[in-house]
Amino acid sequence: MVPENVNVGQRAWRKLPGMPTGDKCGFIELIRDALVLYLAEKIQRQWGQYSPYFPAGKYIPPPSSCSITQVNILQRHGARYPNGDDDYDVAVKHLLAADEFRDSNLYFLRDYEYQLKQDVLIPFGAEQSFEAGEIAYRRYGHLVSEHNLPFIRAASKPRVVSTAGNWTVGFAAASTHHYNPSVNVIISEEKNNTLNNDCPNADDGTKEKNQWLDVFAPSIVKRLKHAAKGAKIKTEDIHRLLALCPFETIAFEQPSPFCGLFTDEEFNAMEYYGDVEKYYKTGYGNSLGPVQGVGYVNELISRLTGRPVQDSTQHDPSLSFPLGRTLYADFTHENLMVAVFSAMGLFNFSEGLNPKKMDENRGWVASRMVPFSARMVVERLACYGSGTEDEDEEGEEEEYVRVLVNDELQPMEFCGAGKDGLCTLDGFVQSQEYARRSGNGDFEKCYN
């Protein structure tokens, strides 16, 4: 069964500007094509949260003395069309108001029509979800049985529900339909819940991302106004025009002409814009950011320990929430994932992001954390002996936890993990004091 709206086998990154067609041969051509491939992948990783999924690291199996006993997956929806309030079409209208285009890179605008739809998953996004389901089965299929299928939840936005559905189809296909999971619970986004961030009194990062926009956008406005005489371009249009490069490229699976309007340096600035937004929206830069992920963290602790949820923030006890399953998969949005990272203590670097100056060596990078179809995987393991240092040592079995974000093993020093990323289960639970205390009063600040 093929997932909804997907052409299996296509890859948006293979359609990026200058990508090799595979028709050439010879050593020089192979070298050139390899270089083009590298550059194309580099371009897509400058798109921040709009980047297509790519592994941030290579998946490393647990130590041989350990066996995985439970897996919890938190995944962002696949690639989508723009949100209805993104106003990309408005930015285009401002550019099309020009009387004359003086730069050949702008000539495509003479007969350009904005054709992007709104909100819903695109075919490539459906395929991303399908492939994620396939990967989950290949890696963790030994945990399931006909009587213990994955338990799956989704936030209620259509793109999230479609992502979850396509994930189940990929999982089933990889098992040759021996296991056919379905979406068990769809949680309404009309109210506060553990798969959708909500905090009315919290800042949304607008001030900080606009500070950065005011740094890098004016020179682009000046350049575009010179190249498009009479254009009505404003500072706030620049990020929207930059974002049309990834949105059109991924939606139409061919290079958007908007990609050619900007330099590599300007796409770097766009990437930092996304980093700043996420940091100050639901990340550490917002005092009420991490609390928006507390509900999910408490549900995660409940699953890992097999004990009822202890949460007074977002968990809804009226919804089905079975314990004792071996594979859980939840589907959500990137802002909720960032809030969960922040609540847990992941990506917590000593210095925050400066909204007025880019840090080239920053560790907080949205394209590595929350690209389209991003996923956090929490593995519970049973290990014999130390489980961490001497795999041949015999001893009693002990439970451990490790966390991977887009296949990159997280260090988790906050719960005593070594280089193998393993924390004892008890150490991990104890490290989540902020969540276990329901945000230390921060949740009430969201509404009072």
Image: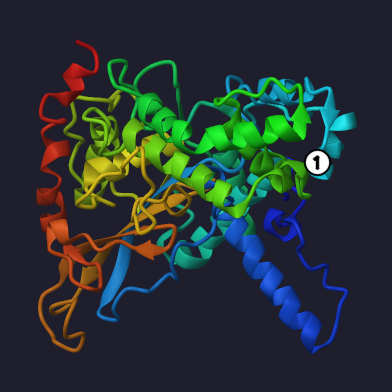
345 lies left or right of 244 = left
State the residue lying farthest toward the top: 448
Q: In this view, does 272 lie above or below 193?
A: below
Q: Nearer the viewer, residue 149 or 139?
A: 139
Q: Position of residue 441 (x, y in %)?
A: 12, 24
Kindly identify the residue that appears in the image at 28 percent across and 16 percent down.
201
56 lies left or right of 50 = left
Label 1: few (<14), some or many (≥20) within 10 Å? few
300 lies left or right of 224 = left
Q: Position of residue 200 (x, y in %)?
A: 32, 16
| Colour scheme of the picture | rainbow
Residue type highlighted by circle 1: Asp
Kindly identify the residue that appears in the image at 40 percent across and 62 percent down.
143
Task: Give the quadrant of residue 278.
Answer: top left
Q: In this view, does 176 lie above or below 49?
A: below
Kindly identify the residue that appears in the image at 19 percent across and 50 percent down.
305
Observer able to see residue 153:
no
Kindly identify the residue that appears in the image at 15 percent across and 30 percent down.
438
Task: Give the quadrant of residue 229.
Answer: top right
Q: Nearer the viewer, residue 117 or 2?
A: 117
Q: How many marks?
A: 1
Q: Position of residue 145 (x, y in %)?
A: 46, 58
Q: Which of 131 and 411 is in front in this view?
A: 411
